[in-house]
Image (spheres, rainbow, N blue to C red):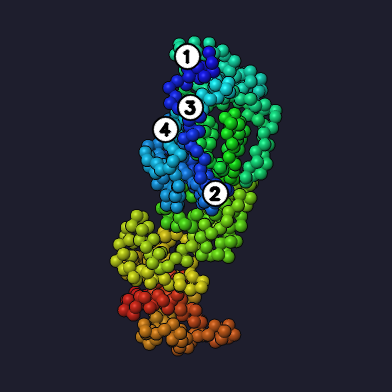
């Protein structure tokens, strides 16, 4: 019996040969240096920040080289697949500008010439290459049941040997073809294993694009490549897929570093060119002085929906991911505050090659604050409308009732060289400007945050004198401030801060104290945007109404 005939018995009904598949997936017509990489999620759960980080890195490197960024669904773990898993993955990453050149676009649809992009639809392909290995005596049928494997494991533990199906423990690799065929004919279930040529005591070298040179023991485990259900294992499938899809760079978390020897071995045994491996550091968190991995179970910021629910701009999230992708991005962004991510040249050598990258949510929020401060009033208003429509219906009704007024509020101290930075997320805005809307101001128990001046009679004197004698809604800012100084002089406060500092005992207080009384009486808060602009927007009649409540 020839090896080809033997392979046909072990894997019957394979539609095409591996040679035919090679012709079906020709080299991509791309310029030299173009990076082809992928996001390869499994529909066994929702993507988290670590997944988005990996996808972001894949995207920027492929985009900046005019390469290809595709999404491949690794869905061979059918037992753990969740309902609508692919749809949920696509919906989760879509707000973060994850646009793919090829791949799945729904649970059933895809675009691109190198598909199918669902591993469960590529079963014939994997079997064709498994047959190639069988024909070359590089793979074999194994009947070892769970009970047999458990016995091997116990024996290895007792004798303090490495665990796994290898060497003398891999008994099925020595079965004759006749024995194998007999057991198959008797209906005994089997899998296909790789016949590893590796020597654990020899070294394999991985030249990682991020981590540099890594030496590890060669793989000598006879890895499963085709499971009893006919589907491939992750290890075997990704090697076949990345070869046929002409992936140039495999960008993934460094938890996969230890698996790389078996992957390198598979590429070699199949006669494939090995892509460049790029292992990225995991995202860590400083938990009260203890550094640990960011956890989707413990840490809300690990969930992608956290950013949507909080109203953190997804563009700001991507800017933050850029800062932890390359160490020099932050300095570049400081020098180019209106720059876009695609304007920056990313470099694998600038990526973090250590054991972890600290995920700093306060820093992300600071980037978000800077980002929001640079938006136009129309941009931030439209985004606020979208956010509140979903997460704060009451506020949505108010701001859409007064669109231009709301835009004017949001525009206070915005269009200037150093714009005001009040908000790090859209969910902050209501708490920052609620007092500008009578619907909210008049239906809330008010707590006034007066600072230096707390005597009620003095407060009433200041606000009544101001509104009766000095307020004119037609005044420009300079005139308004001059009148504030006149108000101070009339009431024995220093209208000039320098004079107050030189002779503090001569005055009851200063212009800042008087301004604070007016500010707090108007808004309840001592921390607000420009007082002149607030007074101008609220208007005299509404100001009087608010002052009358004091």
SS state under label 1 = helix
**Mark sitting earlier along the chain (2/3):** 3
Q: Residue at x 45, y 34 (%)?
A: 119
Residue 50 seen in the current view: no
Dot 3, crowdedness within 10 Å: few (<14), some or many (≥20)? Answer: some
Q: Is residue 313 above or below residue 499?
A: above
Q: Position of residue 187 (x, y in %)?
A: 44, 13
**Mark sitting earlier along the chain (1/2):** 2
**Mark sitting earlier along the chain (2/4):** 2
Which residue is denoted by mark 4 in the rendering?
Answer: 121
Q: Is residue 321 above or below residue 198?
A: below
Q: Position of residue 25 (x, y in %)?
A: 48, 37
The residues tagged by marks 4 and 1 sit, at their Cα atoms, a distance apart of 26 Å
Q: Is residue 160 above or below residue 380?
A: above
**Residue sitting nearer the eye, 321 or 12:** 12
**Mark sitting earlier along the chain (4/3):** 3
Which residue is denoted by mark 2 in the rendering?
Answer: 31
Quadrant housing the C terminus: bottom left
Which residue is denoted by mark 1 in the rendering?
Answer: 184
Mark toward the viewer: 2 or 4: 2
Q: Is residue 141 above or below residue 490?
A: above
The residues tagged by marks 2 and 4 sit, at their Cα atoms, a distance apart of 30 Å
**Mark sitting earlier along the chain (4/1):** 4
**Residue sitting nearer the eye, 129 or 400:** 129
Mark toward the viewer: 1 or 3: 3
The residues tagged by marks 4 and 3 sit, at their Cα atoms, a distance apart of 16 Å
Q: Are marks 2 and 4 in contact (CB under 8 Å)?
A: no
SS state under label 2 = loop
Q: Residue at x 59, y 29 (%)?
A: 269
**Residue sitting nearer the eye, 317 or 200:** 200
The residues tagged by marks 1 and 2 sit, at their Cα atoms, a distance apart of 49 Å
Which residue is denoted by mark 3 in the rendering?
Answer: 17
């Amino acid at each position: 019996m020839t090896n080809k005939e033997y392979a046909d018995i072990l894997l019957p009904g394979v539609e095409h040969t591996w040679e035919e598949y090679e012709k079906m997936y020709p080299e991509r017509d791309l310029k030299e240096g173009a990076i082809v990489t992928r996001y390869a999620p499994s529909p066994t759960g929702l993507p988290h920040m670590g997944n988005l980080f990996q996808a972001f890195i894949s995207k920027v490197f492929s985009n900046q080289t005019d390469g290809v960024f595709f999404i491949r669904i690794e869905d061979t773990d059918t037992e753990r697949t969740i309902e609508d898993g692919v749809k949920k993955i696509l919906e989760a990453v879509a707000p973060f500008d994850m646009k793919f050149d090829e791949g799945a676009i729904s649970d059933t649809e895809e675009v691109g010439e190198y598909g199918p992009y669902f591993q469960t639809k590529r079963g014939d392909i994997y079997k064709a290459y498994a047959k190639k290995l069988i024909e070359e005596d590089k793979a074999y049928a194994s009947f070892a049941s769970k009970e047999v494997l458990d016995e091997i494991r116990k024996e290895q533990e007792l004798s303090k040997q490495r665990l796994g199906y290898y060497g003398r423990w891999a008994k099925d690799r020595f079965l004759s073809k006749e024995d194998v065929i007999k057991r198959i004919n008797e209906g005994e279930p089997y899998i296909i294993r790789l016949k590893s040529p590796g020597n654990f005591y020899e070294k394999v070298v991985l030249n990682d694009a991020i981590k540099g040179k890594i030496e590890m023991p060669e793989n000598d485990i006879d890895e499963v490549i085709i499971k009893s259900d006919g589907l491939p294992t992750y290890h075997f499938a990704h090697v076949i897929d990345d070869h046929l899809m002409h992936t140039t760079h495999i960008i993934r978390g460094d938890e996969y570093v230890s698996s790389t020897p078996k992957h390198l071995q598979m590429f070699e045994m199949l006669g494939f060119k090995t892509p460049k491996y790029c292992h990225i550091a995991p995202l860590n968190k400083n938990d009260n002085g203890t550094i640990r991995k960011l956890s989707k179970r413990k840490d809300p910021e690990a969930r992608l929906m956290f950013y949507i629910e909080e109203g953190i701009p997804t563009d700001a999230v991507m800017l933050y991911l850029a800062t932890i992708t390359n160490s020099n991005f932050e300095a570049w962004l400081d020098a180019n505050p209106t720059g876009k991510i695609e304007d920056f040249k990313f470099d694998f050598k600038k990526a973090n090659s250590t054991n972890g990258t600290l995920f700093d949510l306060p820093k992300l929020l600071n980037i978000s604050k800077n980002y929001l401060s640079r938006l136009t009033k129309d941009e931030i208003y439209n985004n606020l409308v979208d956010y509140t429509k979903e997460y704060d219906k009451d506020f949505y009704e108010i701001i859409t009732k007064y669109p231009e007024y709301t835009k004017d509020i949001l525009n206070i101290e915005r269009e200037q060289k150093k714009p005001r930075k009040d908000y790090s997320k859209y969910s902050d805005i209501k708490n920052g400007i609620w007092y500008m809307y009578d619907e909210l101001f008049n239906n809330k128990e008010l707590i006034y945050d007066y600072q230096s001046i707390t005597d009620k009679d003095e407060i009433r004197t200041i606000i009544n004198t101001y509104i009766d004698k000095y307020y004119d809604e037609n005044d420009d800012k300079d005139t308004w401030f001059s009148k504030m100084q006149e108000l101070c002089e009339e009431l024995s406060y220093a209208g000039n801060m320098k004079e107050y500092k030189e002779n503090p005992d001569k005055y009851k207080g200063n212009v800042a104290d008087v301004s604070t009384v007016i500010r707090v009486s108007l808004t309840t808060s001592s921390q607000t945007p420009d007082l002149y602009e607030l007074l101008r927007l609220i208007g005299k009649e509404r100001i009087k109404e608010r002052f009358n409540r004091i």
